[in-house]
Image (cartoon, rainbow, N blue to C red):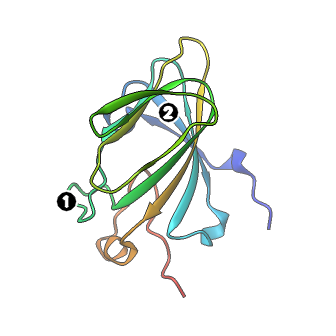
Amino acid sequence: MIENEREDREVLEAMRGGPGSVTVRHFRFAGKGAPTRFLILEIPPGAAEGSHVHYADDRNGIGAYEEFYYVIAGRGLATLGDETIPVGPGDYWHAPLDLARGLANADTEAMLKVHLTVVLRDPETQRARGKTASGLEPPPPLA
């Protein structure tokens, strides 16, 4: 089955406490990618995904997610732990559990587009708690 990403978008105001709004495009693959999710973040000038931490024990209730970022277009400032680094097209990085991460658009005119792969590291616990994080539903049980 071919899915159309134009039909699965949401706009998040103050994503993870960041300024502005971020459009999130979900690629759900009819749930077959679980416990991995594939997203594209569209971050306009002046907006950001705020700094946040996904803990292995989910102590803050936002999910035990590792995240893998790839910049498609635009310029940004990526925060990973205590470092903030300029990023642009072709740059990619891994944000492991228990480490703060965030991403801001560093351009005054162009959209920052980032492919984000999200991997839930404890799907059974998350499903039992009925947790959703970043608008993501807990993945279905693995067969």
The residue furthest bottom is 143
Quadrant for the C terminus, please: bottom right
The residue furthest top is 108
Q: Write the residue at 61% across / 25% down.
A: 74
Comparing 14 with 52, the one in front is 52
Q: Up-down: is 82 above or below 120?
A: above
Q: Which image quarter: residue 130?
A: bottom left
Q: Write the residue at 36% across / 29% down.
A: 84
Query: What amino acid does circle 2 point to?
Result: Val
Q: Up-down: is 68 above or below 31?
A: above
Q: Secondary structure at mark 2?
A: strand
Residue 43 at x, y = what percent?
A: 53, 29
Quadrant for the N terminus, please: bottom right
Residue 123 at x, y = what percent?
A: 39, 73
Residue 93 at x, y = what percent?
A: 49, 45
Spatial separation of the CA atoms under disc 1 and disc 2: 25 Å
Residue 56 at x, y = what percent?
A: 27, 63
Q: Which image quarter: residue 19?
A: top left
Q: Secondary structure at mark 1?
A: loop
Residue on which the image places disc 1: 59
Labels 1 and 2: the sequence-earlier one = 2
- Badge 1 local density, few (<14 within 10 Å), some, or many (20+)? few
Q: Up-down: is 110 above or below 137?
A: above
Q: Which-is-in-front pick, marks 1 and 2?
A: 1
Q: Up-down: is 24 above or below 66?
A: above
Q: Write the residue at 36% across / 78% down.
A: 124
- Badge 2 local density, few (<14 within 10 Å), some, or many (20+)? many
Residue on which the image places disc 2: 22
**Do the residues bearing badges 1 and 2 touch, measured as CB atoms within 8 Å?**
no
The residue furthest right is 2
